[in-house]
Image (cartoon, helix red, strand yellow):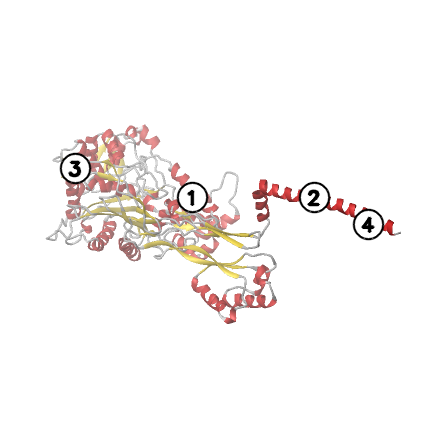
Amino acid sequence: MAKKKKRFLERMQKKLFIIMIFITAFFLFLIGKVYWINKESGNKYEKIVLAQQSYDSIEIPYRRGDILDRNGTQLATSEKVYNLIMEPKNVLQNDTVKAATVSALTQFFSLTEEEINKALKNETSLYKKMLKKLTYDEIAPFKEFVASEDGKDVKGVWFENEYKRYYPHGNLACQAIGFVVGGNVGQGGIEGYYNTELNGVNGREYGYLTEDMTLERTTKAPINGYNVISTIDANAQNIVEKQINKFMKETGARNVSALVMDPNSGEVLAMANSNRFDLNEPYEDSTIRYLLEDENIDYLLNDQEVINYFEVKNGETLPEEKSSLKAVLENGNVSVDEKLNSLPEDFRLICLNKAWRNFIISDGFEPGSTYKTFTIAGALEDGALLGDETFYCGGNYEVEDRVINCHNHAGHGMVTISESLMYSCNVALMQIALKEGRSTFAKYQDTFGFGKRTNVDLAGEASGIIYESDRLNPVELATSSFGQGLTVTMMQIGTAFCSAINGGNYYEPHMVKQITDENGGIINNIEPTILRKTISSETSSALREALFEVVDAGTAQKAKVEGYTIGGKTGTAEKLPRGNGKYLLSFIGFAPAENPQVVVYVTVDEPWVEDQASSGLGTIIAHNIFEELLPYMNIYQTETEESKGDPDVGDQEATPIYEGEVPDDELAGEEDATTEEIAEETNTTAQESGETDGTSQNEGTTDTVGENSDGITEENTDNQNEDSSEEQSVAE
């Protein structure tokens, strides 16, 4: 028995030994396999494992760069704000924490228990944005409470940094600066044109658990946007806007615009329109309120885009919604507030686009007599005038089948070249243009930049409309000589005028002089750029003397400021339809006359006076601007005696008198397609940026505001120049 037991044990030992050998071999094989896998594919599997572990990613917003004036005053900046973030998973760790956190949130913020409990339903979430764009003052009491003994149980709440665009001066230079919509998308002005430079790149913070469950964080810092230093002088801008506001309160007009430039660099020192809006609230009703007031409602209803909005196609009827809206807008007994409340979003967009437009660069108008400066400049420069010529004005001038009136129907008699500017004589200008000929006249239109964009660094610039050389028939040449038929923008006239009085240097106009990083390092210096020579210094000197006489003893005497020598030119432009008594008045001037340091250009669109035809209103605004601006700019007085001027010469009065039908001699032209494309792109950008109302800035569409400087009579309508009658119509 003992022998059998011994034999059994020996067999069992052998079997166990064999099993152990197999097990050991198997484990050795596994160890070898794991080693081989780790060696060959360890990185691959490590990434898979880490990807399955807890991981979070937080975006760190960049700070959009500031816009500053030339002296360092902030015009636009980005302020840090805070988003309140709640972590439901951590808030729900126990009942004590939950109760304390909910109580604190309802106590310090405008959150209800219902809102908080709804957010807590996602129990595993570690990120729930509860409130947006809180100021530091709004979150400070909560943070102090959490740091105290009473708030020790508050968990799972933190604040995410963000930036909000802020404009310290509200509506100052609003059209020039522009504004920002959702996603840091600049709209119009400097904000839109320099959007890429102002924007930066967001950073990101990554967090994940390693193999040993250690929390690791990696931060990629944001890259902040560049600062833009503009050419605008905030004090000069304030002076200009103050004088415009004063005029609007005392007299009023459809619109008043003013442009102030440095003639020796092309820098824009101030750019203002009377219809302003708060850049911090560009979508508010206050932005478009003026359009719905009694004085402006006809202007809105006669706008081509509004006409198209209410247009009824053949065989259709106007939808009830639009029909009701039109009735409300046309009803003078309906208050402005009621009209605002009745506007659908698509019509509000039309109104906002009109309010945001920058008249100075986007709207075309006939310049009237300010254009005479360039007619004379070209004639002198090309030798068509020697400087000692005289011209007789009998009150009108016959050109082919037309009799074209001077604004003084009694005539100016015999006038010199200088006097033709002093008295703003149309007849003399027509004779000067005839001496030039159409090829020379067209050459200087191009040289002074008319009919093309100035390329100022603002989006939505119009190019205006002119007669090219092959279309400058005798009548077109005659009317163009004194600024009728062609259309310009204020920026074109301002830039060309600077070159006419600065020695003949045509500078590219610009709104920005420097781009810097957040530490003040210079990224780009935008130096004054002379694009071409328009006239010689001798011709420029002769123009300065003649333009000084215009202010000293001519039609612009109201622009005089005691102690200063000022030169300039007035203009009137009758708006369509002819004979309606509506005008756009203008004055452009410079000081000091012997060494120009500043140019001021003012336009007044439909002043609210009984007789709009006098050029004096624009001149008076310019006088008030000069009176305050010149001392501020440290431009010293050079006039030792006050000139008495010529009391027999008053304002330039536009008197369009027609002996028959109004001739159809206006220039044919279509809206600038490229600026329309700019507008469409801008609209699309704003809508894609996440703005809830889909509103966007449309600065690009060319809008012809005013036409005609003086009267034209027609002797024989049957024999009108064929080219003229077919091609000439005003672009409104």
- Look at the numbered discs 3 and 1 and tell me whether their residues touch, using CB distance below 8 Å: no
* Disc 4, SS: helix
* Disc 1, SS: helix
Q: How far apart are marks 3 and 4 (CA)?
A: 129 Å
Q: Distance between the residues labelled 1 and 4?
A: 94 Å
Q: Nearer the viewer, residue 650 or 633?
A: 633
Query: For the residue marked with disc 3, what is the amino acid?
Result: Thr
Mark sitting earlier along the chain (2/3): 2
Task: Say the numbered circle drawn on residue 539.
Answer: 3
Counting from the top left corner in percent of width and height, residue 598 is at 22, 48
Counting from the top left corner in percent of width and height, residue 587 is at 24, 47
Residue at the extreme right of the image, as rendered: 1
Query: Which quadrant is the C terminus positioned in?
Result: top left
Mark sitting earlier along the chain (4/2): 4
Counting from the top left corner in percent of width and height, residue 35 is at 61, 43
Mark sitting earlier along the chain (1/4): 4
Q: Which of 631 and 441 is in front in this view?
A: 631
Q: Residues within 10 Å of mark 4 (few under 14, many from 20)?
A: few
Q: Distance between the residues labelled 2 and 3?
A: 104 Å
The answer to whether 165 appears left or right of 40 in the picture is left
Task: Say the numbered circle drawn on residue 26.
Answer: 2
Task: Say the numbered circle drawn on residue 5.
Answer: none
Q: How far apart are marks 3 and 1 (CA)?
A: 42 Å
Query: For the residue marked with disc 4, what is the amino acid?
Result: Leu
Observer-side mark, 1 or 4, equals 4
Q: Residue at x 29, y 52 (%)?
A: 609
Q: Name the residue under label 1.
A: 682
